[in-house]
């Protein structure tokens, strides 16, 4: 079923996560908003902004008779009615309004939950067409209940405890929304008390708490928006100035500006990478929050005294296409940039992709061309190309922008990105081809293995140890549905891992990002259809080591491993662990259908129907198996506000693995992954793939196609081979096509700086047509390439040659 088939289905409410709390309750109304207020030069701009934000939250202007909007209104009314029916009308001092979300003991998560529920009731009360709209009794309860929460549970006299995020970000945003929506039942004293409470816990959006630690990325955006809302509530112009200037980090001289790029740490990097929590590629979640938060504040204060005038704001606009778009595939955000959010049952990758789409549509209401049209095309494509229903959890505000774009036939929804996208700063590469996409999560001294904590992502040990994601048009939901709670956490696709039992991260305090110890991780981009990924892998306890490479071609991925050692327990390189039934079905090895687990000596090929083929290069002991795995979302995520269901889920899986018995000292593997290829094509494939080097120091392959040649190499140390050599660790690619050639070099270790490479070009090249300033090439048949990669952050440099 396509997404278009879903558009008229019943809207469903998903579960709440901390980040969904922010995005689901604050979105801006549709195109034409500003014409309602002119340029907001009214006598009382605070009243104008308050009404503007209320309209943003309620989706003013949405046609209530449109089927999706009508169902959303019905859902909102039903949810509010349920909350009203289950509440204590007159809660005792220090008592709960809702007992099932008990605040006894000061649970910060349940204090936040109470505010979330109050915002839901307030939204229904303020939304035309809901059953509670304008109801005096509901309004009276909102006034009393919000006063109860500020008096007893969130005020300047309370000392924060537990998770700081709730006190400084989660609750402040809810307080802002609540007091805007319920303004008519609040007194001046009520508003001042609420603003004072927010000011107590988030006095300055530039910093964490009352300290001097600079906030960055999504946290800065969230705090700036909360600061603006308290300024609107409390009629404080200085608060709106503080919020606006926090976006540009005026206090810090722009170091943490959300409109500038960074060269280390959190934020958007010059190559489009986004890092958060210091060490993780996080554009799918925290980058998403930054985009959403900034976009909402930009549009809130547009054409007012406090509008954003920072000329660098276009850098954030550019990030929509540069940083986000490569990681959205058929309506899903790729899990390689979602961090611990992969363990959240109520937040699948489609949720994050739709959030980016809605942010783009929000920005499109204000930005000029060419951004406006481009954002509409991208957003419509993201909303319509996958199987998930983009309107199922959309707010009325989001519907007000999405529905017109979806219905506008002049706006194309067929945008698809194809190409090889390298992000050196975050050590991620996305290889996108017609019919399939591929990426790998690597880790290093700079990029963490994975993130766990707050009882989230409890079994995520190997997510960054070379986990490979293959997605195909026929198996697009492979990593959606119940993949994460049922997949074998010791056998993630692409990884070389010990099978030794590990402890769950459940009940661990705070969050942690286990760091890798090796320097070499990253990739190279030769052109739009070819590139490489690699990593020098040493596992968490030093018992498994491997040098790993993936060479990415127009129709295949060549995976090579060497220097494999395992000293404590048996290890495996998981070629594939595929969930069947999501598009994939039968597993065959050398034409034989696999049912029970089998150990096979030196198989030639394997195939999974609906996915593609696998060709083994060399001798391997391979385990092939098909079986059912069972698990629960709660086992991988038992967090206070994101916990998954305890219901057992079962899924059939096909597994292919190369075995590395305990005591292995120089293990190897090599195989070709052939996405979308049939079993017959896989078995008959006769490519001229040559593995020229497969040592602990270097992986070198050569592929000939007619008179053209491709050489790709990952050097983990200085090494000399007959075809290509390097005096430092690096990644190299060289291709010829007719009378032209291209050489590409990167430094995934980011420590080699100056590198000399020699390679046999197979013919004489006598001219350089174009070259990065970091490269110089001595021409001839045997080329000598000198690279100065100081400050390149793992980026690729190239030179184009001519005979």
Image: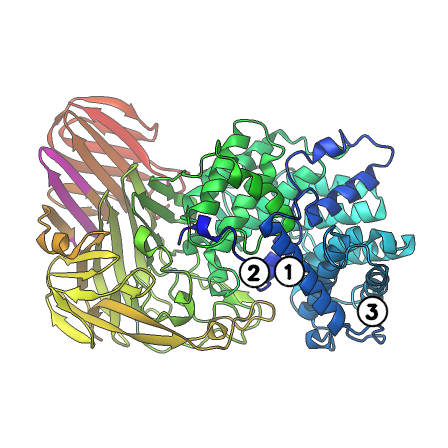
Packing grade of label 1 (10 A; few <14, some 14-19, many >=20) is some
- The residue that mark 1 highlights is 75
Q: Is residue 550 magenta?
A: no
SS at circle 3: helix
Q: Earlier in the sequence, mark 2 or mark 3?
A: 2
The span from disc 2 to disc 3 (Cα, nearest Å) is: 34 Å
- The residue that mark 3 highlights is 152
Q: Position of residue 256 (x, y in %)?
A: 61, 43
Q: Please report the residue visible at 80 percent of the width from the left and 39 percent of the height from the top.
A: 48
Q: Is residue 708 magenta?
A: yes
Of the pair 612 and 203, the residue shown nearer to us: 612
The span from disc 3 to disc 1 (Cα, nearest Å) is: 30 Å
Of the pair 109 and 795, the residue shown nearer to us: 109
SS at circle 2: loop
Note whether residue 666 is visible. no
| Range covered by the magenta-colored residues | 694-711
């Amino acid at each position: 079923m396509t997404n278009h088939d879903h558009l008229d289905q019943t809207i469903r409410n998903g579960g709440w996560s901390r980040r969904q709390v922010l995005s689901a309750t604050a979105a801006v109304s549709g195109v034409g908003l500003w014409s309602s207020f002119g340029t907001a030069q009214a006598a009382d701009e605070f009243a104008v902004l308050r009404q503007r934000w209320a309209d943003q939250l309620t989706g003013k202007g949405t046609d209530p008779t449109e089927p999706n909007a009508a169902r959303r209104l019905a859902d909102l009314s039903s949810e509010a009615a349920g909350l009203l029916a289950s509440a204590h009308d007159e809660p005792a001092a220090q008592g709960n309004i809702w007992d099932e979300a008990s605040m006894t003991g000061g649970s910060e998560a349940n204090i936040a939950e109470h505010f979330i529920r109050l915002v839901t009731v307030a939204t229904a009360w303020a939304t035309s067409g809901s059953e509670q709209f304008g109801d005096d009794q509901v309004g009276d309860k909102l006034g009393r209940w919000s006063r109860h929460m500020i008096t007893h549970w969130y005020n300047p006299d309370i000392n924060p405890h537990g998770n700081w995020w709730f006190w400084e970000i989660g609750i402040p945003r809810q307080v802002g929304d609540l007091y805007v929506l319920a303004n008519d039942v609040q007194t001046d004293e009520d508003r001042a008390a609420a603003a004072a409470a927010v000011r107590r816990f988030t006095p300055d959006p530039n910093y964490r708490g009352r300290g001097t630690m600079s906030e960055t990325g999504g946290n800065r955006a969230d705090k700036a928006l909360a600061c603006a809302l308290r300024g609107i509530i409390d009629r404080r112009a200085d608060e709106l100035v503080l919020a606006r200037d926090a976006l540009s980090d005026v206090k810090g001289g722009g170091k943490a500006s959300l409109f500038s790029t960074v060269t280390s740490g959190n934020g958007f990097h010059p190559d489009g990478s986004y890092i958060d929590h210091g060490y993780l590629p996080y554009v799918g979640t925290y980058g998403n929050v930054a985009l959403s938060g900034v976009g909402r504040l930009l549009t809130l204060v547009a054409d007012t005294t406090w509008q954003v005038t920072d000329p660098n704001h276009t850098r954030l606009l550019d990030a929509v296409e540069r940083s986000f778009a490569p990681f959205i595939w058929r309506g899903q955000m790729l899990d390689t940039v979602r961090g611990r959010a992969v363990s959240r049952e109520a937040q699948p990758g489609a949720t994050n992709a739709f959030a980016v789409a809605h942010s783009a549509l929000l920005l499109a209401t204000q930005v000029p061309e060419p951004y406006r049209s481009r954002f509409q095309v991208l957003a419509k494509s993201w909303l319509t190309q996958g199987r998930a229903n983009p309107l199922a959890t959309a707010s009325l505000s989001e519907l007000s922008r999405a529905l017109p774009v979806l219905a506008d036939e002049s706006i194309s929804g067929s945008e698809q990105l194809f190409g090889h996208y390298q992000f050196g700063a975050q050590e991620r590469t996305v290889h996108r081809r017609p019919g399939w996409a591929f990426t790998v999560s690597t880790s290093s001294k700079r990029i963490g293995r994975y993130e766990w904590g707050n009882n989230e992502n409890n079994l995520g040990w190997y997510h960054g140890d070379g986990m490979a994601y293959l997605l195909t048009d026929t198996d697009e939901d492979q990593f959606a549905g119940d993949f994460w709670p049922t997949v074998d956490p010791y056998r993630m696709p692409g990884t070389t891992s010990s099978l030794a039992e590990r402890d769950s991260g459940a009940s661990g305090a705070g969050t942690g990002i286990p760091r890798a110890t090796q320097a070499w991780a990253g990739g190279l981009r030769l052109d739009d259809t070819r590139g490489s990924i690699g990593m020098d892998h040493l596992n968490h306890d030093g018992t498994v080591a491997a040098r790993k490479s993936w060479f990415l071609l127009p129709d295949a991925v060549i995976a090579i491993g060497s220097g494999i050692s395992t000293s404590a327990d048996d290890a495996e390189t998981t070629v594939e662990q595929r969930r069947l039934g999501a598009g994939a079905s039968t597993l065959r090895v050398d034409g034989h259908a696999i049912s029970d687990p089998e150990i096979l000596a030196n198989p030639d090929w394997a195939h999974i129907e609906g996915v593609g083929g696998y060709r083994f290069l060399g001798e391997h002991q391979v385990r092939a198996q098909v079986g059912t795995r069972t698990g629960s979302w709660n086992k991988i995520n038992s967090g206070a506000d994101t916990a998954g269901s305890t219901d057992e889920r079962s899924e059939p899986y096909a597994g292919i693995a190369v075995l590395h018995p305990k005591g292995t000292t120089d293990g190897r593997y090599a195989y070709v992954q052939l996405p979308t290829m049939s079993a017959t094509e896989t078995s008959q494939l006769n490519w001229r793939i040559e593995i020229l080097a497969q040592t602990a120091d270097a992986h070198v392959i050569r592929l000939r196609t007619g008179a053209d040649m491709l050489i790709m190499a990952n050097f983990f140390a200085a090494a000399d081979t007959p075809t290509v050599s390097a005096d430092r660790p690096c990644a190299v690619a060289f291709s010829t096509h007719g009378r032209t050639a291209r050489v590409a070099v990167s430094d995934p270790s980011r420590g080699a700086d100056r590198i000399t490479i020699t390679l046999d070009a197979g013919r004489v090249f006598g001219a350089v047509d174009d070259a990065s300033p970091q490269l110089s090439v001595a021409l001839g048949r045997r080329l000598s390439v000198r690279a100065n990669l100081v400050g390149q952050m793992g980026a690729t440099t190239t030179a184009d040659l001519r005979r």
